[in-house]
Image (spheres, helix red, strand yellow):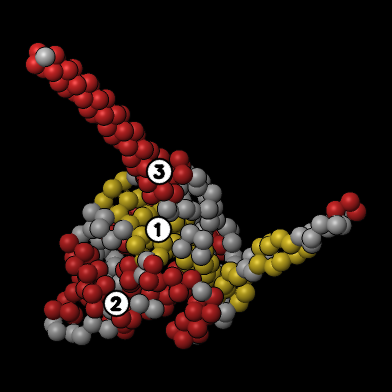
Amino acid sequence: YLLGICCLLALSGLTKAEDEAVEIDGTVEEDLGKSTIGSKTDDETVEREEEAIKLDGLNVSQMKAMREAAEKHEYQAEVNRMMKLIINSLYRNKEIFLRELISNASDALDKIRFMSLTDPNVLSATSDLKVMIKPDKENHALHIIDTGIGMTRQDLVKNLGTIAKSGTSEFLAKMEEGETMSTDLIGQFGVGFYSSFLVADTVVVTSKHNDDEQYIWESDAGSFTVSKDPRGDTLGRGTQISLFMKEEAYDFLEEHTIKDLVVKYSQFINFPIHLWTSKTEKVEEPIEEDEKAEAKKEKSTDCDSALIPLL
């Protein structure tokens, strides 16, 4: 009798062990499934990051290929130091970025107009000298475009990454003398471009000079890249600065905000400034006779964007 009981207990133990083994196997399969899902999520994250910065006419694969082939540069130490000074000192007065970028655009227009006095052919691409501002709420981007002199590849590297012509050296010297950081100071030494990083995580500069092909400069304030624009010549001549805005700076994409800032800071610019505007309207769709019984249908349509003069 005792022997029979022992046999039953032994069989019961084996059955339980088999059940536990099945549960363990099941757990392993579940983990493998989670790993696959996680991998898929990682791929989607990479895709989203690649799509985060969009330029008209460039698809995701072109953007990726361009970045892989781009020349990679580090900022000179003085430029890095100067950018940190601007960002840390002027963070309460972010709006001055637009004043500085419009002022730079005006300088570029002045240069090409001056050159045209002795050589009218420099205006062959376009003789319409102006500044255009285009907010893109969908992609959280603000574009400032001018038809000025533009920059060559070498200009982009030197003017935006070194102290050669940016005024950075003189600016830092003033700061070391005890000069108080002010919005007037950065304009005086021509370093206002870097105020873009007060409102933008990433800045992309597309430029076309008469003496070179069209190039794209891109930076996140840590380093920068320069590459030939795969779209070719889309500007004709001039520069487009694209700011991919920080979340706290989305208000600068609003039309009324842009208008107010242009009137406040740029009323003495000698060139016309235009703003791209668009609106959405609801229109009724025509209904066929056999659909009259159905409720009226409506759809939203985006009207064509229009350029309106600000100054």
Q: What is the C-alpha distance between the residues marked 2 and 1?
A: 21 Å
Tally of numbered tags:
3
Instruction: Kindly identify which residue carries mark 2.
Output: 91
Outermost front residue: 1
Q: How busy is the neighbourhood of tag 1: few (under 14 within 10 Å), some, or many (20 plus)?
A: many
Which amino acid is tagged 1?
Val
Is any atom of residue 244 visible in this view?
Answer: yes
Residue located at (57% from left, 73% from top): 274
Q: Which of 212 and 308 is in front in this view?
A: 308
Task: Please give left or right for residue 185 compared with residue 46 in the image.
Answer: left
Which amino acid is tagged 2?
Tyr
Q: Which marked residue is nearer to the observer: mark 2 or mark 3?
A: 3
Q: Residue 204, labelled with which disc?
A: 1
Query: Split into 4 quadrants, where in the image is the C terminus?
Result: bottom right
Q: Are marks 1 and 3 in contact (CB under 8 Å)?
A: no
Q: Is residue 189 above or below residue 124?
A: below
